[in-house]
Amino acid sequence: MKDPLEATTLQILKAIGEDPHREGLKKTPLRVARAWREITSGYSADLDKIFNGAFFKAYSREMVIVKDISFYSLCEHHMLPFFGKAHVAYIPGRHIVGLSKIPRLVETFARRLQVQERLTAQVAETLFKKLKPRGVGVVIEAQHLCVNMRGVKNETAFAVTSSMLGMFQTDSRVRAEFLNLVKP
């Protein structure tokens, strides 16, 4: 077995007391290696390719929101999943961006070992840097399996994080409008 992810998975199976050669587990190291490469593909993503030059002249200065963006990530502390919804808004400067680029941006940063606070900030800061809007707001709501299934074992807890830049940070009316528009 040359693949280090497969070899490590084989060792984990042995360490927890499983027989990695039993029928249901024979191909598990291969499947786990493929899954890990997919769910950590954000490390190899090129942010410029994500945006792919999809900036267009802005004809409006009103808030643009893409809400309820589903995502899945892995907590860097326990390597257990956390998942939820991201709400991303910006107020255009000179340009707007293709709407599909926003969920792709969220997915790129989510497909890394993460903490929710950093994920929120990375999405906001990258959009602010690449698009140069008048402001960016990001709110992420997520459920963490490291909270739900281990430790405190609280099945109903959700974490909510936000990052506000530009007008979303300095203008309380803009911030309030955004938060009102994304609440369930």
Image: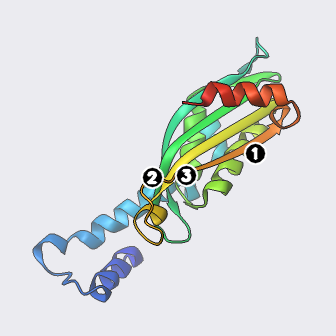
Mark 1 residue element = helix
Residue named by callout 1? 125
Residue named by callout 2? 156
- In this picture, residue 58 sits left or right of residue 7: right
Gap between marks 3 and 2, in whole Å? 21 Å
On the image, the x and y values in percent for residue 22 come to 13, 79
Gap between marks 1 and 2, in whole Å? 30 Å
- Where, by quadrant of the figure, is residue 20 drawn? bottom left
Q: Earlier in the sequence, mark 3 or mark 2?
A: 3
Residue 95 against residue 154 in the figure, above or below = above
The C terminus sits in image quarter: top right
Residue named by callout 3? 110
Q: In the depicted view, which residue is nearer to us: 5 or 17?
A: 17
Q: In the depicted view, which residue is nearer to us: 92 or 138?
A: 138
Is disc 3 surrounded by few (<14), some (14 to 19) or many (20+) residues within 10 Å? many
The amino acid type of the residue labelled 3 equals: Ala
Which of pointers 1 and 2 indicates the residue nearer the eye? 2
Q: Earlier in the sequence, mark 1 or mark 2?
A: 1
Q: In the depicted view, which residue is nearer to us: 136 or 20?
A: 136
Q: Earlier in the sequence, mark 3 or mark 1?
A: 3
On the image, the x and y values in percent for residue 30 come to 29, 69
On the image, the x and y values in percent for residue 150 come to 42, 70
